[in-house]
Image: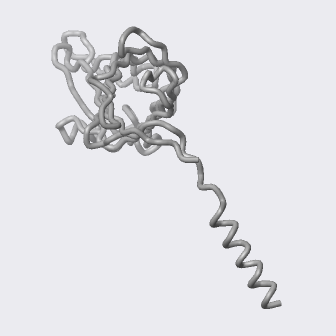
Amino acid sequence: MALGASLLAAATALLAAVAPAAQVPDGWDVDPAASSVTFEVRHLVVSRVEGRFGDFEVTVTGSAPAFADASVRAVVEIRSVRTGDDERDEDILKPAFLDADRFPRAYFVSRRIEPRGSDRWKMTGDLTLKGTSRSIELDVRRDGPVAGGRMRMIATGTIDRFEFGIRHNPIVETGGAVIARDVELTFAITLIRRIATQ
């Protein structure tokens, strides 16, 4: 019995040693220190509020810098929002806006990437925000060359916050909305090359 158990343990250890490691796809990982996810919205008709999310992950799977063959996924932690005003940041987390307690993350998953000239693309994907998913389009450009296994991409687009259930819309005395419906998004992402493992 002891010999049989020893042989079984040895065989198990041998199989574990020679078993292939989990495959990691070819692609790119984000350098968070050199990247940002920001938004901008018109406020009080004439001014604009800028904000950023400090905690996010972006992965790009695909072998070619041409990017059109890529698949992109982003996850943004809603509670990491900062606009330079603590009281406003707390308001953004409340149910009238992003409702961070119920929906702590936003997600983007690309569905199609089409070339639009030299180092430019149109990316179509699904954005999930406050529990609602909508198809959006982002204009993407490569910001500089691919060098040292790194490249920088800028993706911009505009969403209608009403389409995501963010309908809080107080009106100022002059008749305009305090907060505009359209929100401009910018993903400025520096990516680091990831080599596939077999």
Q: Can residue 106 be seen in this view?
A: no
Quadrant of the rendered structure where residue 6 is?
A: bottom right
How far across and how far down the image is residue 65, in percent? Answer: 42, 26
Residue 16 sits above or below residue 184 on the image: below
Name which residue lies at 33% across and 31% down.
151
Please report the residue visible at 76 percent of the width from the left and 81 percent of the height from the top: 7
Q: Which of the pair 110/66 is nearer the observer?
A: 66
Establish if 17 lies above or below 110.
below
How many circles with numbers are drawn on the protein? Answer: 0
Quadrant (top left, top right, bottom left, bottom right) of the N terminus: bottom right
Left or right for 14, reference 137: right
Horizontal relation, residue 193 to residue 4: left or right = left
The residue sitting at 41% across, 9% down in the picture is 116
Pick whichever, 50 or 37, lies toward us: 37
**63 displayed left or right of 9:** left
The image position of residue 190, as x and y in percent, is 31, 34
- 49 vs 31, nearest the viewer: 31
Residue lying farthest to the bottom in this orientation = 2
